[in-house]
Amino acid sequence: MLIDVKNLRKEYCAEEVVTKVLHGLSFSIEKGEFVSIMGPSGSGKSTLMHILGLLDRLTSGDYFFEDKDVTKLDDNELAILRNEKIGFVFQSFNLLPRTTVLDNVKLPLTYSKRKINIDEKAKNVLESVGLGHRLHYFTNQISGGEKQRVAIARALVNEPSLIFADEPTGNLDSKSGIQVMEILQHLNKMGNTIILVTHETYTAEHAQRIIKIKDGLIVEDVQVSNRRIATDGINLK
């Protein structure tokens, strides 16, 4: 079991006003699954992603990641676990400006305790997403689709147990969006666990399973019967 969540609740307090966002969610995700968390704006899906990704803490409930109770970890322990075990791909890419593609992908490795050749590792991961020819380009010299592929490479470089993709096609044209979904499906086929956060049914249906959230509650948790398969012929390894 990769993730096991029971009765997860989250609320925010500001000036004595309590806003309840998540209302007792329970589910589990196995290693190697491709799961979409789907819901409209304000449903609580982004808050859930932040908690599952160890970027925020739950208010009450249980959360076990690889059988470890993360509610008992301090901030430093959470940061180490997040860096070693979790990769993130965001809609806005979050790449460093005026920095090369290679240096962006190398960044997570600078905080890693693993003894490896950082340049070689980053190059290999970029080649695996079809960007071996863009190593020394600056991020302002590549397309939006290529930026998202750099973000995926950066998420992969530490060989995480889990990859979060938060609206990864939201800022892309349809062709680039298909390429990104093809890469995510390829990574899942290679054994990576993927959690895709989206409000779009079309995008969600590229996963094997969809967890639908509305008003902070799970309203549906189903296997995708007619899964969409993205193919655009990019050179993946």
Image (cartoon, rainbow, N blue to C red):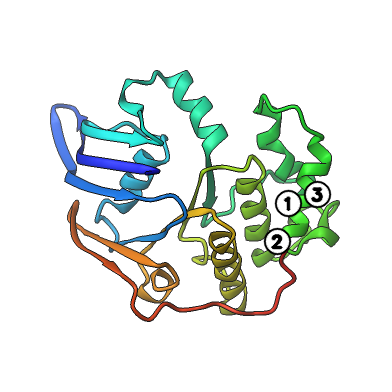
Please state which amino acid type lies under the numbered disc 2. Answer: Val
Can you say which quadrant of the picture contains the C terminus? bottom right
Q: Which mark is residue 82?
A: none
Verify CB contact (< 8 Å) between mark 3 and mark 1.
Answer: yes
**Depicted 185 relative to depicted 82: above or below:** below
Q: Between marks 1 and 2, how big is the CA–CA gap?
A: 7 Å
Q: Gap in Å between the C-alphas at discs 3 and 2?
A: 10 Å
> Helix, strand, or loop for circle 2?
loop
Residue located 44% across and 50% down the image: 31
Calculate the distance from the C-alpha at mark 3 to the C-alpha at mark 1. Answer: 5 Å
Whether residue 178 can be seen here: yes
- Residue picked out by circle 3: 123
Let me know if residue 100 appears in the view. Answer: no
Residue 54: image quadrant is top left
For residue 57, above or below residue 6: above
Instruction: Say if mark 1 contacts mark 2, CB within 8 Å.
Output: yes
In terms of secondary structure, where does tag 3 sit? helix
Q: Position of residue 163 (x, y in %)?
A: 51, 49
Label 2 crowd (10 A; few <14 / some 14-19 / many >=20): many
- In screen coordinates, is 113 left or right of 89? right
| Side of 5 relative to 200 (left or right) | left
In the rendered structure, find residue 129 and report the number of the disc placed on it.
2
Q: State which quarter of the image contains the N terminus.
A: top left
Circle 1: element type: helix
Residue 219: give x, y in percent of width and height. Answer: 17, 62
Q: Which residue is mark 1?
A: 125
Is residue 91 placed above or below 222 in the rendered structure? above
Amino acid type, mark 3 = Lys
Question: Which residue is located at x 35 percent, y 74 percent?
Answer: 201
Mark 3 residue crowding within 10 angstroms, few (<14) / some (14–19) / many (20+): many
